[in-house]
Image: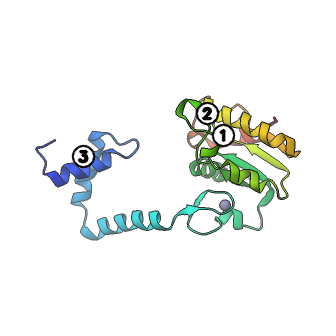
Amino acid sequence: MDYYSTKITALIEELSRLPGIGAKSAGRLAFHLLNMPQADVERLTGAVLEAKRTVRYCRQCCTLTDSELCPICQSPSRDQAQIMVVENTRDLAAYEKTGKYNGVYHVLHGAISPALGIGPADIKLKELMQRLQGDVEEVIVATNSSLEGETTAMYLSKLIKPTGIKVTRIASGVPVGGDLEYIDEVTLLRALEGRTQL
Ligand code: ZN
């Protein structure tokens, strides 16, 4: 790519590091950015920097938010006794889109994967166990149906069962290895309604 100037090549390289962006798309985006009005580019980079600066983990559920407690944990109409455990903030968003779940969440930010060297201490598990000391009736394990998601579900069930809190797993209507965020709302609702006790 040395037929471009160094600065353009650098921009293309940075963009191609983003997930789902190949060399071709990176080039297209780079030239699109360069053709945008200066003010638009500044608004875009400003939004990226501002989000990066202010976004943090919710004190309670560990989702990404820009306040100490996320809007879901803050809401008085949500049932704090029902906690749905998901792997990431995008999975949380997928369930929120259905508009039918009224409990709260816990975001693990990953799943246990011995193959990748990701253990229980590498995800937000300790934070979940601390929450279970409060008034919790049910933990719904909604990790993905991948090997990592299932491993995490089994681990959680073993950990939580002795506390006497009900542990359920969403139904396996969710395709194996499927990322929750790509599954349609009807399938998600069916998986939630058909959950079984672990
Ligand atoms: Zn929260």
Residue 181 image label = none
Q: Earlier in the sequence, mark 3 or mark 2?
A: 3
Q: Is residue 71 left or right of residue 82?
A: left
Q: Going by the image, does 29 lie left or right of 111?
A: left
Residue 106: percent from left, percent from top: 68, 52
| Residue 12 appears in the rendering | yes
Mark 1 — residue? 143
Q: Residue at 63% across / 57% down in the picture?
A: 62
Quarter of image, res 37: bottom left
Give SS at disc 1. loop
Q: Which residue is mark 2?
A: 148
* Badge nearest the viewer, 3 or 2: 2
Q: CA distance from mark 1 to mark 3?
A: 35 Å
Observer-nearest of 47 and 121 = 121
The residue drawn where x is 65% and y is 41% is: 120
Q: Label 3: state its secondary structure.
A: helix
* Left or right side of 91 for 50: left
Graded by Cα atoms within 10 Å as few (under 14), some (14 to 19) or many (20 or more), the crowding at tag 1 reads: many
Answer with left or right where residue 130 lies relative to residue 51.
right
